[in-house]
Amino acid sequence: MEIVYSGKAAKQMKSICKADQKSAEMIFQAIENYASNPQVPPDIKILKGKKAIFYRLRMGNYRVVFERDKTSMRNYEIRHRQGVYK
């Protein structure tokens, strides 16, 4: 499965890398693990948006909001759990 980051998600990931390298490595690892084997979801929850169905991947204190299909995983937000759903 191809992993695609939006501009916003890439910027958020860069700031997480600068602030907390250990959490950034855990996030990258969780995304890679899910993309390589989506049948075994680590901690996935379905979120409903206005136009599409989004998923949430929980990794420690961070959340990855993404959309998926058979060939790709499009990451839209990677933020701390306190501000990701606003």
Image (cartoon, grey):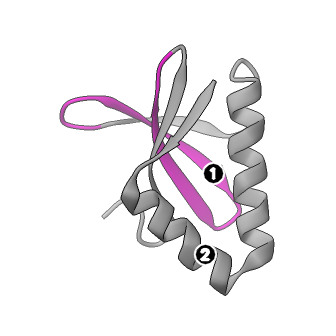
Mark 1 falls on what kind of element?
Answer: strand
Spatial CA span between label 1 and label 2: 15 Å
For residue 67, side relative to residue 57 (left or right): left
Q: Is residue 63 above or below residue 4?
A: below
Instruction: Quadrant for the N terminus, please.
Output: top right
Question: Which numbered disc covers residue 58?
Answer: 1
Q: Which stretch is magenta?
A: 49-69
How many discs mark residues in the rendered view? 2
Instruction: Quadrant for the C terminus, please.
Output: bottom left
Q: Residue at x 72, y 54 (%)?
A: 28
Outermost residue toward the top? 70
Q: Dominant secondary structure of the magenta stretch?
A: strand
Find out whether residue 10 is within the magenta segment.
no
Position of residue 66 measured from the top left corner of the image (x, y, whole percent): 46, 41
Q: Residue at x 26, y 38 (%)?
A: 49
Mark 2 falls on what kind of element?
Answer: helix
- Closer to the chain start, of discs 1 and 2, is 2
Q: Toward the viewer: 8 or 50?
A: 8
